[in-house]
Amino acid sequence: MDELELLKKDWQKQEQQLPKLSYDQIYKMIWKKSSSIVKWIFYISIMEFAFWIVLAFLPIKSEVRNGDGAKLILFTEWAIQIISLLVILFFIYKFYQNYKKISVTDSSRDLMKKIIKTRKTVMQYVWFNVGLFATSIIVLLVEILIYDPPVELTEKVSSASSGILAWLLIGVFFAVAIAFFGVLFWLFYRVLYGILLKRLNQNYRELKKLEV
């Protein structure tokens, strides 16, 4: 027990020697970290937009198809690309706004609100990209099934006792495949932005302690 008391006294002496941080000093530290995180979210979204731009304009050769169906699918592909780029630009603007607003925050309550808003914007962005990915895969599958169906697939459908049931099973298989790859795509974005959001959430909790 004497040794324990000595340890306690020694720890108390060390605590007295440690510098005491004021409310303003702690707030400024959290504010700087939060501002830096939001800035990186903005930078990553710009790099991602540049990646999709390069991907969209790569000279990929494809077989030219005629007919109303081919034109409709081609129009849908271009529409998805244009809409996706416009929406990503919108989110980049939102991320920039969040960064600028968080840089001029003058109270911990305002900073907490802007952290919540940034988290919400990032999650909306992630779910938009997951939905866009699923839509793109569906369009691609429809194009393959209409214009270039696998030989094995057509043989199985023609040899099946019920063509409707066969196509129904194929639809279920594709739905499961889309869901599986959609989850993988979602996990990719969770890793990409999740680390930054985790640090932002930690800053939010620290600010909440200051307000108590």
Image: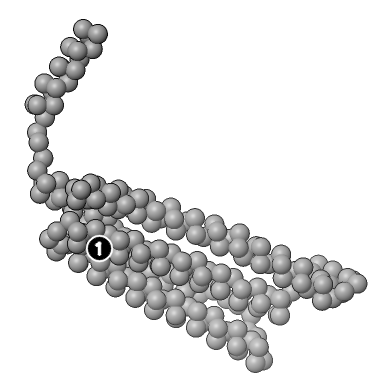
Q: Secondary structure at mark 1?
A: helix
The quarter of the displayed image where residue 179 is located: bottom right
Q: With 27 as the anchor, is 66 left or right in this view?
A: right
Residue 164 seen from this side: yes
- Above or below, comparing residue 89 to residue 79 in the picture: above
Q: Residue furthest bottom?
A: 68
Of residues 170 and 73, the one nearer the viewer is 170
Give the x, y percent position of residue 14: 13, 23
Residue 150 seen from this side: no
The type of residue carrying mark 1 is Lys
- Above or below, comparing residue 185 to residue 63 in the picture: above
Q: With 37 as the anchor, is 73 left or right in this view?
A: right
Of residues 208 and 94, the one nearer the viewer is 208
Q: Residue furthest top?
A: 2
Residue drawn at x 24%, y 58% is 112
Residue at label 1?
114
The quarter of the displayed image where residue 93 is located: bottom left
Residue drawn at x 72%, y 70% is 171
